[in-house]
Amino acid sequence: MPNTEVAGENYLRFGIAPVLQGCGVAEGGVKVCRAVLQPERASTFGPTVVKVLVDNNHCGYVPDENVASFAVAFKKLKRGQCAYCDARSWGSNEGGTWRVSLTLIFDGATEPEQNHAAIEAEKQRARAERADR
């Protein structure tokens, strides 16, 4: 199954923001986390949707075009059970407005985690060091 970009996360960005803040990246960054994939039947969005949660925060949905590929796995679950996978959460807090993205990871590949505040502090330190020369 290919990595899947979660849909609707910008409408639910306040679900991802606490995940990043809880990991110590209040200004934003990249974190790998564990996502819960929860099938919902009889939703207003369609006959079957897959809700994505991280740390019990609703962060979005598996896009409609990918839901069918999850169906076989979900048929093996007992009522009330959920599936899990790794997810890459990205967020940027710009003046209190979060811009976010969440990607479900199935290929095992991840990128390094980042802390945007630490990166910006390092850039400012380097600029100051160059200015002192």
Image (cartoon, grey):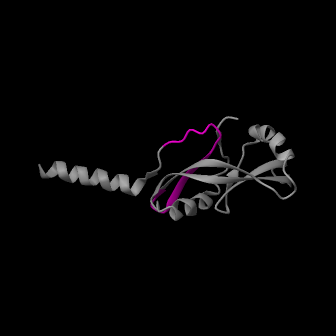
Position in image of residue 45 (x %, y %): 80, 50
Q: Is residue 104 magenta?
A: yes
| Above or below, 101 relative to 106 | below
Determine the image quadrant of residue 115. bottom left
**In the displayed structure image, the side of residue 102 where residue 41 appears, left or right:** right
Farthest residue, direction left: 133
Q: Residue at x 51, y 59 (%)?
A: 97
Q: Residue at x 27, y 54 (%)?
A: 124
How many tags in the picture?
0
Relative depth, front residue between 50 and 64: 50
| Above or below, 63 relative to 58 | above
Relative depth, front residue between 28 and 55: 55
Position in image of residue 5 (x %, y %): 64, 42
Q: Residue at x 35, y 53 (%)?
A: 120
Position in image of residue 117 (x %, y %): 39, 57
Range of residues picked out in magenta: 93-111
**In the displayed structure image, the side of residue 125 where residue 86 appears, left or right:** right
Q: Examine the rendering and report whether any part of residue 29 can be seen.
A: yes
**In the displayed structure image, the side of residue 78 where residue 115 appears, left or right:** left
Q: What quarter of the picture does the N terminus occupy?
A: top right
Q: Is residue 13 magenta?
A: no
Determine the image quadrant of residue 43. bottom right
Position in image of residue 49 (x %, y %): 80, 49
Farthest residue, direction top: 2
**In the displayed structure image, the side of residue 23 where residue 126 appears, left or right:** left
Q: Examine the rendering and report whether any part of residue 10 can be seen.
A: no
